[in-house]
Image (spheres, helix red, strand yellow):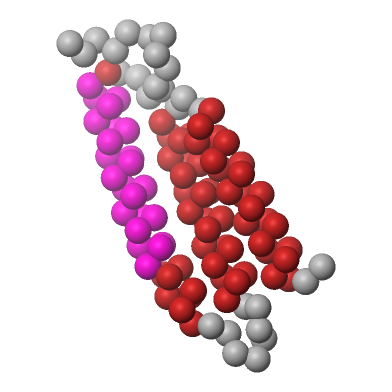
Amino acid sequence: MTKVVFYSLVAVGLFTIGFYTLLVEVHLLRKIMALNIVFTSVFLLLIAIAARYPQAIDPLPHAFVLIGILIAVSATALALRLARRIYQETGQTDLSEKQETGIS
């Protein structure tokens, strides 16, 4: 098994774990952490694809990863701010439907 295949399989595993957690979990901070795991898996896959040929590494996926990191940090900051706002409004950090939110 080559390094590219290994890193690609790890990226697929991380994506699966992150996406499953994003769908199943009701706590906001756990959803944000799952979103970051999904972002990380995409970055790992792009870097693994970039290193296919050891003679000349393609710089384009590296540029995509750098831009993606900036987008991931911005999305995380926005999600944390929204989670804080939801907590201030409702007093809870989970999104379960069985609890009353108190918002009219």
Q: Position of residue 33 (x, y in %)?
A: 48, 42
Q: Main secondary structure of the magenta part?
A: helix
Picture layout, residue 3 above or below residue 41: below
Q: Position of residue 56 (x, y in %)?
A: 60, 90
Q: Position of residue 23 (x, y in %)?
A: 51, 32
83 and 14: which is toward the camera: 14
The answer to whether residue 3 is left or right of residue 33 is right
> The C terminus lies in which quarter of the figure?
top left
The answer to whether residue 20 is left or right of residue 27 is right
Number of numbered discs: 0
Picture layout, residue 51 above or below residue 48: below
Q: Residue at x 28, y 27 (%)?
A: 86
Span shown in magenta: 67-89
Q: Residue at x 77, y 71 (%)?
A: 2
32 and 51: which is toward the camera: 51
Q: Residue at x 68, y 63 (%)?
A: 7
Picture layout, residue 13 above or below residue 67: above
Q: Is residue 92 magenta?
A: no
Q: Quadrant of residue 78?
A: top left
**Residue that protrudes farthest toward the right in the picture:** 1
**Residue that protrudes farthest toward the bottom in the picture:** 55
> The N terminus lies in which quarter of the figure?
bottom right
Q: Quadrant of residue 51?
A: bottom right
**Residue that protrudes farthest toward the left in the picture:** 104
Q: Position of residue 5 (x, y in %)?
A: 72, 66
Q: Residue at x 47, y 48 (%)?
A: 36
Picture layout, residue 68 above or below residue 32: below
